[in-house]
Amino acid sequence: MRSQERKTPRWPSHMARNRKKRKQRPVQMPSECYNTAAVHRAMTRACEKAGVPPITPHRLRHMAAVSIRNQFGLEHARATLGHTVASMTEHYSKMAGAKLASEVAAAVG
């Protein structure tokens, strides 16, 4: 710690000023720390550190929507994503429709 490595003593006025600063700063609640931007930033940094292309929380939501829709159907995906209208779920899982169509075409021939 830098304060322990000091060669000169700290001045009482500096100590008082630091105490005063600490009291003015409120303690952040966990919900205030983890907003959308913080999660996005953490994911971007993790991807950079891992050496993989960056992925966003929005992209993860799309991938989950496609996976849920393929596995369980449109209504399950709508309920999981919290949409009131199925057309919004369709928007999120557009890729699922193309995949399902190609599976039907392959099966029918």
Image (tube, rainbow, N blue to C red):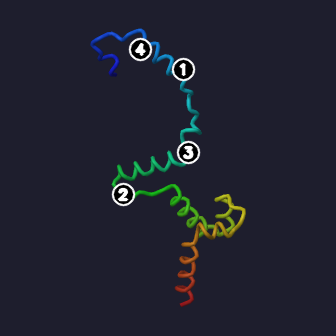
Of the residues under marks 3 and 1, which one precedes in the sequence? 1
List the residue tagged with mark 3: 35
> Which amino acid, by three-letter code, is at mark 1?
Lys
Which quadrant of the rendered structure holds the N terminus?
A: top left
In this view, 99 is above or below 109? above
Could you tell me which secondary element the residue under label 1 belongs to? helix
> Percent x, y for residue 108?
57, 89
Q: Residues within 10 Å of mark 1 (few under 14, many from 20)?
A: few
Query: What's under tag 3, amino acid-wise?
Result: Asn
Mark 2 touching mark 3, by CB under 8 A?
no
Q: Work out whether mark 4 precedes mark 2 in sequence or the reverse, and give the earlier one.
A: 4
Q: Secondary structure at mark 2?
A: loop
Q: Nearer the viewer, mark 1 or mark 2?
A: 1
> How busy is the neighbourhood of tag 3: few (under 14 within 10 Å), some, or many (20 plus)?
few
Residue at numbered disc 1? 23
At label 2, counting other C-alpha atoms closer than 10 Å, the crowd grade (few under 14, some 14-19, many 20 or more) is: few
The residue carrying mark 2 is 52
Distance from the alpha carbon under mark 4 to that under mark 1: 15 Å
Q: Secondary structure at mark 3?
A: loop
